[in-house]
Image: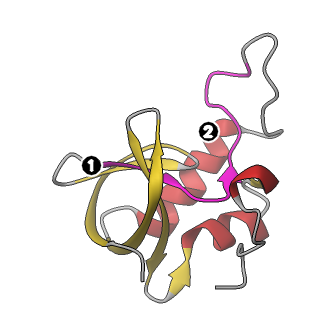
Amino acid sequence: MLPLLLCAVASITDGDTFRCGDGTRIRLQAIDAPEIHGCRRGRVCAPGDGQASKRALERLIGGRSLRCERTGTSYNRVTAWCTVGGVDVSCALYRGRWAIRLARYDPARQLCRR
């Protein structure tokens, strides 16, 4: 079993990152959402509207409590599989087309199969 983190969502950064009330920053596992301020030159980014993706995440988890299973770290953020009300947040964003699957961060193909 992976280390469990309980998170009271304090703020949403973008379509795949948020902050818990204790200050922990969480990056959702296996997905990539469009960038809010556009894609920097030379970088491959998820297509779509970053603001719309952020709003979708806000509707799903804003002000709620999540259960997150830590998987590692990335850029000073905890990477994790998170659920809210029994719903896998990464999967919900992927199925809603607010994010894409990142195969290199989901080699076991767990997205929407957990």
Principal SS element in the magenta part? loop
- Residue ID at (19%, 54%): 21
Q: Which residues are magenta?
A: 25-39
Name above or below for residue 52 compared with residue 6: above
Give x and y (percent) for residue 6: 26, 72
Position of 42 with respect to 50 (left or right) is: right
Name above or below for residue 49 compared with residue 38: below
Name above or below for residue 62 compared with residue 85: above
Residue with the most extreme left position: 22
Name above or below for residue 13 compared with residue 104: above
Q: Where is the C terminus found, in terms of image quarters?
A: bottom right
Number of numbered discs visible in the structure rendering: 2
Q: Secondary structure at mark 1?
A: loop
Give x and y (percent) for residue 107: 77, 63
The residue identified by callout 2 is 51
Residue 3 painted magenta: no
- Residue ID at (72%, 55%): 98
- Residue ID at (66%, 32%): 35
Q: Quadrant of residue 2?
A: bottom left
Q: Foreground mark, 2 or 1?
A: 1
Q: Amino acid at mark 1?
A: Thr
Give x and y (percent) for residue 86: 48, 89
Find residue 24 and name its label: 1
Q: Amino acid at mark 2?
A: Gln
- Residue ID at (67%, 59%): 30
* Mark 1 crowdedness (10 Å alpha carbons): few <14, some 14-19, many ≥20: some
